[in-house]
Each structure stands twice: as C-alpha cells, then as structure tokens.
Amino acid sequence: MTKGRFILVAAAPLLLGAAPAWASGINLGWNDCPGGATYSLTQTFACNTNAGIHTLVGSFVAPAGVEMMSANENVIDMQTGGAHLSAWWTYGTGQCRPSSSLQGNFDFTAGPSTCYDYWQGGAIGALSWSLPPTSTNRCRIKGVFALPSGDARITSIPEGTHVYSFKANINNGKSTGLGACGGCSDEACIVLNTIAINQPAPQPPRIQLTSPAPSAFVTWQGWSTIDPANNCPDVTPARSRTWGSIKALYR
C-alpha cells in the first residue's frame, strides 16, 4: 500500500463524518461543495464592476469500484431565459467575452477544503465552451483533466467519500462600462450533467455519474421569472466524449 493510499483511507471517516451521507452522484455549487460555509445554489451579482470572479465547484460522492482514479471528464449545460443566449455567457473567438473569462482550475491545495482534495495540486487539463447546434439560448462547458500517467497520487477512493472534481472560474470582465456585454443581469440555469471517472487498465476504464448528490444545478441571478418554483428546467442531456479520444493528451 502506498503512502498516498494510506492517507486517503485514514482520512475518509473524518470526511464522511463532517457532512451528510449521500448515495454516489454529482454536485454543483457556488464557492464550495455541500457542507462548506460559503456553499450556495444561487449567485447574485450587481454587474457593476469588471473585477472579481465567481467560482463554480463540481464534486462527486464516490461509488464503489474507484481503485485508481486518473482523470475526470465533466459536462455542464446552461441556458438563459430569453430566446437567445445572453452575450455575457459567450466566450472565445467571435464571441462577446474572451475565452480567458472562463477558466478551469483543478488545484484545491489553497482551499476550499470541505471535501476531499484527491488531485493534491497535480491535475492538468482545461475547460472548453461551445454552442450546441440545435439551440439558441444554451451553451455547453466540457472539462477534461488528469493526473500524469504513473503519478503516485493515482490511487483508490473509499465509497461514500465526497471528492472535489473541478472549479470553473467566471470573471466579471465586460460586465459594465464601455464595451460591456449584455445579459450579465439575466437569470441563468447551470446544470452539471455528468462527471466521468477514468481509470487506467486493468481497472474498469470509466465510471459515469449522473445522479444529483445532493444537487446538480445552480442558478445565476435566480430563476423565478421563468419558473415560479425557482427550479431549473430540464436541460438536454449531454453527449459525452469518450476518454479514448482524449487520453493521449495526458500520456
């Protein structure tokens, strides 16, 4: 048993005792995972500054069978309430905001620390943004990140452990003033559809989690004008990329 594996197994009871026990699944929150003092399911912003960031945190409750987690993939779908996606939520070439306004971060060594930091600062990868071809008011954010092949941190996760997966940092650039992008104040629904756990051979190569644990969606500026119950509507399930098409990036 490696030293890293021993530390994880020893720490797991403490982590599980600090928060309610959920069945295996995925969670999306603002600022932290469930149980954290800053964890929230809605974020409001006055759109009156171009400074600062808002952080989405994706996490999961481990199922049985995670023996050597080497990577995660995530798929997020989001929509705004109008007929067309608000410009503030568009990123990249030809869009209102630059791609740098949406950044993936997989390093939890400086916090938050409510849930288990499996990556220990070693994961590499990125988030990508796209517009689905069949929708006018939605976008999709995909993430692929991994520990380097053969890394000593690739080890097991006890069933029931709540584990950090990723952070998505959304900055406030172009929220106000000359050149501001419209729609910062529009309500939005953001849904984490999947987190896939990837493992090297001879382990089962992929465990895909889709069930909420406890909530796989958050809102931006609320969602009351579209849904009086303040719940996100159904968002088209994501079509995940296979790990085989991208694993070469991390060899």
Image: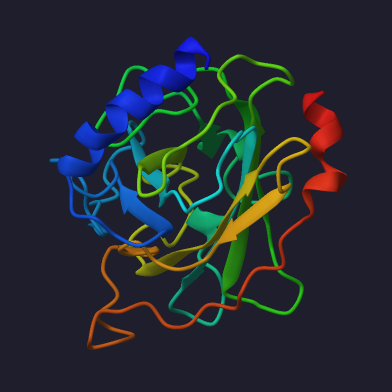
Q: How many marks?
A: 0
- The structure residue drawn at horizontal position 86% and vertical position 46%, both measured from the top left corner, is 245
Quadrant in which residue 22 is drawn: bottom left
Quadrant in which residue 97 is drawn: top right
Quadrant that contains the C terminus: top right
State whether residue 231 is above or below residue 26: below
Outermost residue on the top side: it is 3
Front-most of residues 112 and 208: 208
Q: Is residue 154 left or right of residue 57?
A: right
The location of residue 143, given as percent across then percent down, is 62, 44
The location of residue 35, given as percent across then percent down, is 18, 46
Coloration of the structure image:
rainbow
- The structure residue drawn at horizontal position 65% and vertical position 68%, both measured from the top left corner, is 238
- The structure residue drawn at horizontal position 61% and vertical position 75%, both measured from the top left corner, is 237
- The structure residue drawn at horizontal position 30% and vertical position 75%, both measured from the top left corner, is 223
The location of residue 55, given as percent across then percent down, is 36, 41
Front-most of residues 72 and 47: 72
The reply to whether residue 207 is in sight is: yes
The location of residue 173, given as percent across then percent down, is 44, 38
Quadrant in which residue 214 is drawn: bottom left
Outermost residue on the front side: it is 1
Front-most of residues 41 and 20: 20
